[in-house]
Image: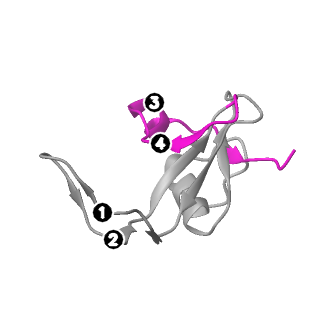
Amino acid sequence: MNMDQTDQGFAWALTQLKAGVKVRRRGWMVRQWLTLVGEHDWGVGIAETPQLIIPKPTTLKPWIGVMGGKGYFSPWCPTCADLLSNDWEYARDD
């Protein structure tokens, strides 16, 4: 089935993310987009508190990050609305 740009569901968006392509929802601010952050080592020192011990180095598993409209990049988790919407599109590089 050939879906045009106006009918792209979350499965399409996830496929694009896995291929290294940035995506966004049509209603989001222009500067807001998602990307897949690949697995990588994070060179933290040993942090020891009563609740937490992080070995050095730690391998971070892949995760989806969002570039927010104000220039902040952070982890992202889809809402039910994101999962069920059909307004996903390629993010522009402007």
Task: Measure the C-alpha gap from mark 4 to mark 1.
Answer: 26 Å
- Identify the residue position indicated by label 1 in the image: 46
Q: Position of residue 66 (x, y in %)?
A: 58, 43
Q: Amino acid at mark 4?
A: Trp
Q: Which mark is in front, 1 or 3?
A: 1
Closest to the observer: 79 or 63?
63
**Residue ID at (44%, 64%):** 62
Q: Which mark is residue 81?
A: 3
Task: Measure the C-alpha gap from mark 1 to mark 3.
Answer: 39 Å
- Identify the residue position indicated by label 2 in the image: 56
Q: Amino acid at mark 2?
A: Lys
Which of the two discs, 4 and 2, labels the residue nearer the N terminus?
2
Task: Measure the C-alpha gap from mark 2 to mark 3.
Answer: 38 Å
In the picture provided, is 78 more to the left or to the right than 3?
left
Q: Is residue 43 magenta?
A: no
Q: Which residues are magenta?
A: 69-94
Mark 2 near mark 3, Cβ–Cβ under 8 Å?
A: no
- Identify the residue position indicated by label 4 in the image: 76
**Residue ID at (27%, 68%):** 55
Task: Measure the C-alpha gap from mark 4 to mark 3.
Answer: 14 Å
In the picture provided, is 85 more to the left or to the right than 91?
left
